[in-house]
Amino acid sequence: MVTVGSSADFDRALANASAGTTIVLRNGTYQKSGTFEIRRDGSSSGPIRIVAQNHLGATIRAEYLLLSGVHVHVSGLRFDNSRVIINRDNCRLSNCSFSGSSGRTSIDGAANVVINNNEFRGWSDRCISFNPLLNGAGKNPHIHGNYFRDSSNVAIAVGFQTGHQMLRVGALIERNLFVNCTHDQVVNFKSSNNRARRNTMISSGAFVSRFGVDNSFENNWCENSKGIWLTDRNCTASGNRLNGSEIWVLAGNVTSDQIRSVNNGHARAESARLVNNAAQRTIVGVAWSGFNLRAINTVVEGHNGRIDQSYDQGTQIRSTNNNSAGTGASRLQASDVGPVASNVTVPSEPSSSTQSPAPSEPAPSQPTAEAPTTPSDTTSTPPTTDSGPSFSLDTSSFDNFLQRSNQPSGQSTFSRQPIFQSRTPTTTSEPTSSFGSNFSRSLFGNR
């Protein structure tokens, strides 16, 4: 164990660390105009640990802390307008507090990174950005138990560009709390095979699968937020509870197979599955000027809440008015997430290489079972020849979705004015009284 009390001591400890070393920072501020960096490797049995002597008593104030070694664990520190950059495998960032516009984390091409039980507030750009690299080296990040609050920027981004679309990253985003995170895309997937489950979003934007296949959103709680938006192929929303929030299945201007070759392409939703969700309203086929391809082959099953069909084709709606829909979701409190002082320990013996225990959490809940269907409770929408359905929309809610995807802000070729006339919803089913009846309808207006 190496205890340090100054920036110079901290630099020396980082340069000389080896597998099993624990670097303990005394209370105080570790300030530097440039970067603190560790290039030494830990091991699975002896990670290099960087911890505060007293929980959140040590503050990093530098451009960033760069983890360039494998098996490096950072816990219990405070980052004042400073970033953490992780570019090697099997690193962990836990029980830390980030504040200021630069208080965020980037993961570049690293596998098996864990980001847990941190607090982030007031960041700019993307708070946690995961870049899998075009060769797919970055995969399997586990981001859980964090508290995100008070920002107008993206909280979690998994993938950045259309070249990441088919990379099966395997991110698991669970048990995070988002409060007053007002960007449209609070959690944004631009890659494949990612899961967001058991999170809570309050007065915030949306969970968005911008592109990528086989992404899923399970047992999340959305309250007075924009909800869940699905595009591209084989994406799923199941067991979610959306109170004053909505589910959108989007039309587009390209197919899934074309997304990597078309500038500013927006892949239409293909074969989306919505199972056992309770939502203020669900709209299949949200379309904007420039979106000329219908959302196709959506299945809505075991649903509770109003369902509208817009610019869609082949939609199947089964077994609605399900009072048990969304019961697998629960509302997280601030006390359930963020830094947990009791889980940050400093070894009492210099020779110890014991890893601090991960914050305990309940076993992952499983998505609610799908409701059985029979021919009598199934409706199907065949291809239509009309000019397409839609409704009156507030254009502000899709602004960043168009402008921040593949094109600089202000250069989108799409008009955010609805182009289709409305048609009668296929199924209208308001939520039960236990789900609440006075939902905000500011996005779409009362109908």
Image (cartoon, helix red, strand yellow):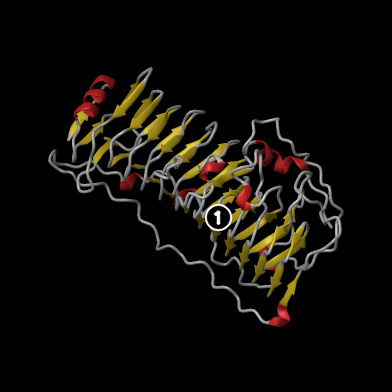
- Looking at the image, which residue is at 40% across and 44% down? 138
Q: Which kind of residue does numbered mark 1 sit on? A: Val
Count of numbered tags: 1
Q: Which quadrant of the rendered structure holds the N terminus?
A: top left
- Whether residue 408 can be seen here: yes
The residue identified by callout 1 is 213
Q: Is residue 289 left or right of residue 92?
A: right
Question: Front-most of 209 and 8?
Answer: 209
Residue 312, by quadrant, is: bottom right
**Eyeballing the image, is 127 above or below 113?**
above
**Picture coordinates of residue 164, whole percent (x, y):** 51, 44
- Looking at the image, which residue is at 62% across and 52% down? 256
Q: Which quadrant of the rendered structure holds the C terminus?
A: bottom right
**Picture coordinates of residue 420, whole percent (x, y):** 84, 51
- Looking at the image, which residue is at 55% across and 62% down? 329
Question: Front-most of 340 and 229?
Answer: 229
**Picture coordinates of residue 108, whole percent (x, y):** 41, 37
- Whether residue 246 can be seen here: no
How crowded pointer 1 is (Cα within 10 Å; few <14, some 14-19, many 20+) is rated as many
Farthest residue, direction top? 33
Question: Front-most of 164 and 348?
Answer: 164
Residue 15, by quadrant, is: top left
Question: Front-most of 260 and 390?
Answer: 260
**Picture coordinates of residue 394, whole percent (x, y):** 78, 44
**Eyeballing the image, is 58 above or below 90?**
above
Determine whether the residue tagged by mark 1 lies in a helix, strand or loop. loop
